[in-house]
Amino acid sequence: MRIRKVGIYTGRFYAGLLCVLLVGVLLGSLFYGSMDTGIVKRLNSAQTGYVSLRQNLDFSKILLRTLSSSTAFLLVIFVSGFCALGQPVAVITLAIRGLGLGVVLSQMYSAYGVHGMLYSALLVVPNGLICSLALALGAREAICLSNQYAVYTLSDRQENGLRETVRLYCTKFLVLEAVLAVSAGADCLIAWMTKGLVPV
C-alpha cells in the first residue's frame, strides 16, 4: 500500500506548520497581556526562578527542565501519528507549544522591560527555535503516518502492513529526540556564558 507524500514533504507544508507555531506565539503574547494581575505576578515569580536556576549554573536541573519540556511535546506528537485521526492533535500541539513560548517571551519583557528582549534572545529564543523546528518536523512525520493509518483502515486491501513505515517513523523521532537533547545541552552552555548578565 502506497500513500502519496509529495504534498506533505514540501517546503510549503513545513512552512505552514511553522506558521501554526508562530500564530501560537502571537496568541500567547496577547493572552499574557489580558491575564489577571495576580496570575501575572505568579508567572513573573516563576520566571525569576527560571532565571535564577541559570544564574546558579545548576546544569543538571537546566538540562532536565529543558529536555523534559520539549520531550513531552514531542511524545504527544509521536503518539498522534499512530491514530487515523491524529492530524489535528499534532497541529494543536504545535499551537500550544507556540502559545507557551509567547507567554514566556512576554514574561521576560514584563519583568525586564526593553532589556527583556535581549535576555529573551539569549536565554529563550535559541532553544525555543531549535525545538520548534524539530517539533514541526515531528508533526509532519506524524501527519504523514496518521494519513497512512487512515487509508489503511478504510482500505479493502490490507495485505501489506506498516511495519517498515513504523520502524522508519520511530527512527526519525529518535533522531529528533537527539536534536532536542543537543539543544538542551546548548541551553546549559548558554547559561554558563550568560552568567551574571540577567538580574535575578
Image: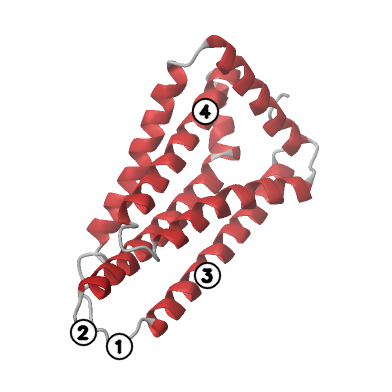
Q: Which mark is residue 160?
A: 1
Residue 42 drawn above or below residue 163 = above
Q: Measured from the top left, where is residue 52 in percent x and y?
A: 74, 31
> Residue 162's image quarter?
bottom left
Secondary-structure class at tag 3: helix
**Which amino acid type is marked by label 4?**
Met
**Which amino acid type is marked by label 2?**
Arg
Dot 3 alpha-carbon crowd within 10 angstroms: few under 14, some 14 to 19, many 20 or more: few
Earlier-in-chain disc, 3 versus 1: 1
**Which amino acid type is marked by label 3?**
Val
**Do tag 4 and tag 1 residues touch (Cβ < 8 Å)?**
no
Q: Residue at x 51, y 12 (%)?
A: 36
> Residue 118's image quarter?
top right
Secondary-structure class at tag 4: helix
> Which residue is nearer to you in this view: 131 or 119?
131
Q: Residue at x 23, y 81 (%)?
A: 2
What is the CA distance from the residue labelled 2 to the residue labelled 3?
Answer: 32 Å
Earlier-in-chain disc, 4 versus 3: 4
Q: Measured from the top left, where is residue 70 in percent x and y?
A: 55, 50
**Which numbered disc, 4 or 3, marks the residue closer to the eye?**
3
* Mark 2 lies on residue: 157
**Do tag 2 and tag 4 residues touch (Cβ < 8 Å)?**
no
**Do tag 1 and tag 2 residues touch (Cβ < 8 Å)?**
yes
Dot 1 alpha-carbon crowd within 10 angstroms: few under 14, some 14 to 19, many 20 or more: few
Earlier-in-chain disc, 4 versus 1: 4
**Which amino acid type is marked by label 1?**
Asn
Quadrant of the image containing the C terminus: top right
Residue 93 drawn above or below residue 150 = above
What is the CA distance from the residue labelled 3 to the residue labelled 1?
Answer: 26 Å
**Do tag 3 and tag 1 residues touch (Cβ < 8 Å)?**
no
What is the CA distance from the residue labelled 2 to the residue labelled 4?
Answer: 56 Å
* Mark 4 lies on residue: 117
